[in-house]
Image (spheres, rainbow, N blue to C red):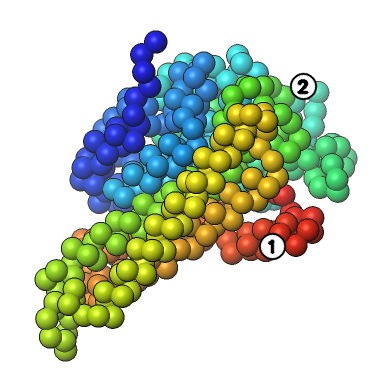
């Protein structure tokens, strides 16, 4: 058996081509096709897919480090890689034949999915009838399959899958040719993710092409990787995006500080004590948040391998570390942006797009500050809301 590639090294080697394509990715609102094909051929869209489907099935620490490396080059590319990688973990919950149909037939077998506020799935014989619009499908313009999440009802409107007072929720999977894609992704940041929407009306989805909410089913695949909930992998992966963008902003301000003489000041920025102190603190914030996240991920990975599951405590602490990493990365990015002064506002300088991208990360589910409330509930011995753990 050939040794697995070092995907971190692969990402580093591709970084110059990602940087070169970044402007066009932003303009076209999707990863440009030649680069996308190269990323697929390098295996970077199969990082969390099971090995038996031709995936890399990397450990969570490696996954975050690869996403972080790509994010240093372009946040949108890293975001799409992270989102579609998380979606590919659905393979561990599907019947093997269905998983092969979706992911195993071609290296370009890619699933993109998103939630459907107001969408509805009616249980019928053999499956479901789904109607509604589903949003935030990052990478859908490259996907071969798309999915939508919504609650399940019976024909009378009751919720037969309700458990513990919550409506039953499932992901419903469609070949991309069966849905209508909607061009809605006109945004200030992460423009290149192409996070558009799709709509269906009374579309039949067989039972086998649905994925239950993770707390209602166990994965079929015994790998320790699939003991990590998909929501956890989304959280740590998108934290990797934020860390990578913040690192590129910090590198950019260090480079600028060598020669930039701020208006009204004597000498270059690097000679000013306030900047020196701020830079040191930013480095500490970013480095400590990153190290804590990766350390907890490594501990959780080892524990999942021994116990065959990921404990609630591990899930809570990973949620905390991921949310903290996003918060610290944003503070570091803000420091670099403000320190750059007027240079930062010009298109083409290394600050403006990264600043917009980083603040768009904070607006997504994984960047919400109320995750700290959930963690606080757990630390106080209260029953936490586990929906995003």
- Identified at 71% across, 33% down, the residue is 212
Q: Position of residue 237 (x, y in %)?
A: 48, 45
Q: Quadrant of residue 62?
A: top left
- On the rendered image, what quadrant is the N terminus found in? top left
Q: Quadrant of residue 168?
A: top right
Label 2's element?
Answer: loop
Q: What residue did someone put label 2 on?
A: 126
Question: Mark 2 Cα within 10 Å, few/some/many (few <14, many 20+)?
Answer: few
- Residue sitting farthest toward the top: 1
Look at the numbered discs 2 and 1 and tell me whether their residues touch, using CB distance below 8 Å.
no
Report if residue 53 is visible in the image.
yes
- On screen, residue 52 above or below 32: above
- Identified at 16% across, 89% down, the residue is 264
Q: Position of residue 119 (x, y in %)?
A: 69, 45
Q: Position of residue 362 (x, y in %)?
A: 49, 61
Of circles 2 and 1, which is in front? 1
User: Residue 388, which numbered label?
Assistant: none
Q: What residue did someone put label 1 on?
A: 376
Q: Position of residue 15 (x, y in %)?
A: 25, 41
Please report whichever mark, 2 or 1, sits nearer to the chain's N-terminal start: 2
**156 on left or right of 202:** right
**88 on left or right of 347:** right
Q: CA distance from mark 2 to mark 1?
A: 43 Å
- Identified at 53% across, 53% down, the residue is 322
- Identified at 73% across, 38% down, the residue is 215
User: In terms of depth relative to the viewer, which is nearer, 99 or 70?
Assistant: 70
User: In terms of depth relative to the viewer, which is nearer, 140 or 376?
Assistant: 376
- Residue sitting farthest toward the bottom: 264
Counting the numbered discs, the total is 2
Report if residue 147 is visible in the image.
no
């Amino acid at each position: 058996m050939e040794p697995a590639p070092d995907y971190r090294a692969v990402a580093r080697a591709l970084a110059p081509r990602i940087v070169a394509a970044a402007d066009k990715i932003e303009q076209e609102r999707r990863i440009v096709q030649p680069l996308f094909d190269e990323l697929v051929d390098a295996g970077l869209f199969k990082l969390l897919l099971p090995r038996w489907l031709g995936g890399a099935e990397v450990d969570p620490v490696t996954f975050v480090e690869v996403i972080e490396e790509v994010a240093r080059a372009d946040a949108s590319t890293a975001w799409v890689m992270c989102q579609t990688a998380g979606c590919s973990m659905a393979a561990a919950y599907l019947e093997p034949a269905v998983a092969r149909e979706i992911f195993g037939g071609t290296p370009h077998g890619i699933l993109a999915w998103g939630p459907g506020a107001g969408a509805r799935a009616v249980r019928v014989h053999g499956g479901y009838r789904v109607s509604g619009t589903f949003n935030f499908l990052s990478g859908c313009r490259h996907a071969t399959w798309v999915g939508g999440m919504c609650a399940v009802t019976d024909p009378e409107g009751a919720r037969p899958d309700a458990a513990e007072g919550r409506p039953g929720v499932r992901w419903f999977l469609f070949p991309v040719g069966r849905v209508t894609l909607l061009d809605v992704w006109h945004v200030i940041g992460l423009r290149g993710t192409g996070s558009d929407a799709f709509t269906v009306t009374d579309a039949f989805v067989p039972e086998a092409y649905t994925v239950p909410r993770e707390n209602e089913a166990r994965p079929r695949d015994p790998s320790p990787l699939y003991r990590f909930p998909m929501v956890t992998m989304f959280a740590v992966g998108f934290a990797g995006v934020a860390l990578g963008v913040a690192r590129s902003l910090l590198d950019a301000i260090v480079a600028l500080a060598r020669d930039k003489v701020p208006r009204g000041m004597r000498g270059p920025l690097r000679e000013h004590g306030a900047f020196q102190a701020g830079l040191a603190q930013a480095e500490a914030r970013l480095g400590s948040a990153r190290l804590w996240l990766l350390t907890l991920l490594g501990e959780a990975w080892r524990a999942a391998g021994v116990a065959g599951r990921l404990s609630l405590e591990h899930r809570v602490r990973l949620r905390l570390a991921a949310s903290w990493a996003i918060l610290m990365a944003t503070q570091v990015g803000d420091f670099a942006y403000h320190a750059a002064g007027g240079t930062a506002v010009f298109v083409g300088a290394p600050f403006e797009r990264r600043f917009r991208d980083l603040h768009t990360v904070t607006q997504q589910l994984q960047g919400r500050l109320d995750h700290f409330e959930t963690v606080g509930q757990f630390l106080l011995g209260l029953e936490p809301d586990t929906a995003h753990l």
